[in-house]
Amino acid sequence: MYYKETSGAIFMYGLINSLMCRGGLKLKLVIFVLFSILTTVGVLNYFTIPLIKSYMKDKAFEVSITTVERIAEFSSFALLERTYENRLNLDDSIEKVEKSDTKGIIGISIYQRQKNDNNVSFTYLSGFGLNNKEMPLDENLLNTLNNSMEEEVIYHDYSIRTPSQTIDTYRFSKPIIYTYQNHSILLGVALLYYDKTSINGVIEELLEVILWITISILLVITLFVYFIGANLTKPLLQITQAAAEIAKGNFDINLSIKTNDEIEYLAKQFNKMILSLREHEKMQKFVSNSTMHMLQEDASSKLTLAGEHRTLTFLFCDIRNFTTMSEEKEPLEVIGIVNFYLNLQSKIIKANGGDIDKFIGDEVMASFSGPDATKKALKSAIEIQALIKRENIKREKSGETVCEVGIGIHRGEVIAGNIGSDDRMNFTSIGSVVNIASRLCSNAAPAEILIEKNTYEQADAKYIVELKPSFSAKGLKNNIEVYSIMHTER
């Protein structure tokens, strides 16, 4: 049982949460306004209805007391003088009350007191409503009348029971007393019955009016708030959609929101942020990934010229016959050709986890880190040569200039860090390993991949290799032993 109740509660919470999310700000705004109005109406009703009820009761008592006193006055003449005219006046006054249709007064009864020997009784004289002739006076009222010698109006809660219903009333009684020579004689009593539900009926009618007014106001305000919310959420949705596009990497966005409020200010600041991101994206093209990582890691600290020892694998790619081509062709055409081949190489290097350190003219300097760095560099080199071979076939068919590249790979310890001056620096790597990798690239023939022997053997790679003649390098005592990588695996 507990599990079912808990599951139901969780389901309802999820459903409400889902509706709130789908409805968005408009739904929340409408709910807030409706809740505020209903709360206000509820609080007002809580405090005003009792006041209104008290006021209505006071007015009902005032009307009832005034009426019963007037009837008692006419009754006193009719009971005392017993003339036809006085009786007619009494009946006329009672008829006026009956025809006035005063809300709440459901009956009037006039009783005259009779005394036979030692027995005192009250008999019905006149009135209207309630089958008064069949309603004997109750014992409590009789005791009150027999002991009362003052002409004050008193009231009791009184229930009238009929075969079909029970009516709860206020019964107002006015003793009819004649005073002669300081002696008071009880002639009879005037009774007025006031239906309690009349007061509640007025309250119910008032509540019904309040209910319909509240519903009308709620409908109008709901529509008003909905349209206001639509105008409010529309620019916010534009900002949300723009943020989603930015998350996808699309910075070609400009918000045009004119609301003359905080949302317009937010849109302007958002546009400034987009402009900054756009500039940042452009700057990234001129900065290596390693430099970007360094800036992100040390964003809160001041940049200094510093470095650290790191073991990396370096890959150099150089376009062959670039000098001859640059002399024969227009500069714009040369730039287009170089960018085409550099773009091919860059995509493959990045796809294999490499970092483009820099472009040196027509040459690419890239580094790989981690335990599989050399394997990644070899894979990149082979994919580069294979892709260039395929692209060159296409370019030859279309009559475009074709180029080939030589690649050199070497691994070892270097110094990596911020190198340059106080106002201009670059995060790069220096050392003999870098120089040897560059030298291997220079010695590689077009479409060839050269790798230092120990670097290849430590990588435990499975390619077909050819041992090339060793060569010397400036600053090194021993010659460099080199393998040429075939573009297939063993």
Image: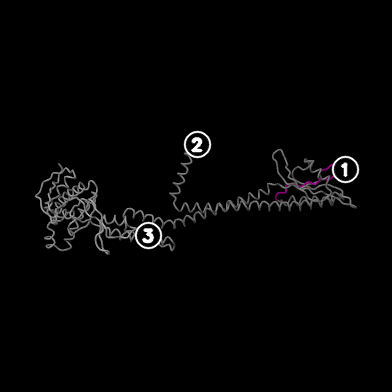
For marks 1 and 2, the one nearer the N-term is 2
Which of pointers 3 and 1 indicates the residue nearer the eye? 3
Report, in whole angstroms, how far the alpha carbon at label 2 lies from the one at label 3.
50 Å
- Give the percent coordinates (x, y) of residue 401: 13, 57
Dot 3 lies on which element?
Answer: helix
- Asked whether residue 88 is in view, the answer is no
Q: Name the residue tied to disc 3.
A: 270
Q: Which amino acid does label 2 sit on?
A: Tyr
Residue range corresponding to the magenta coloring:
103-123
- Give the percent coordinates (x, y) of residue 408: 15, 52
For marks 2 and 3, the one nearer the N-term is 2
Q: Name the residue tied to disc 1.
A: 115
**Left or right of 296 in this view: 487:** left
Q: Name the residue tied to disc 2.
A: 2
Dot 2 lies on which element?
Answer: helix
Report, in whole angstroms, how far the alpha carbon at label 1 lies from the one at label 2.
75 Å
Mark 1 nearby-residue class (10 Å; few <14, some 14–19, many ≥20):
few
Q: Which amino acid does label 3 sit on?
A: Phe
Magenta segment: does it hold 17?
no
At x 29% / y 56%, what residue is drawn? Answer: 294
Between 236 and 213, the one nearer to me in the picture: 236
Quadrant the C terminus occupies? top left
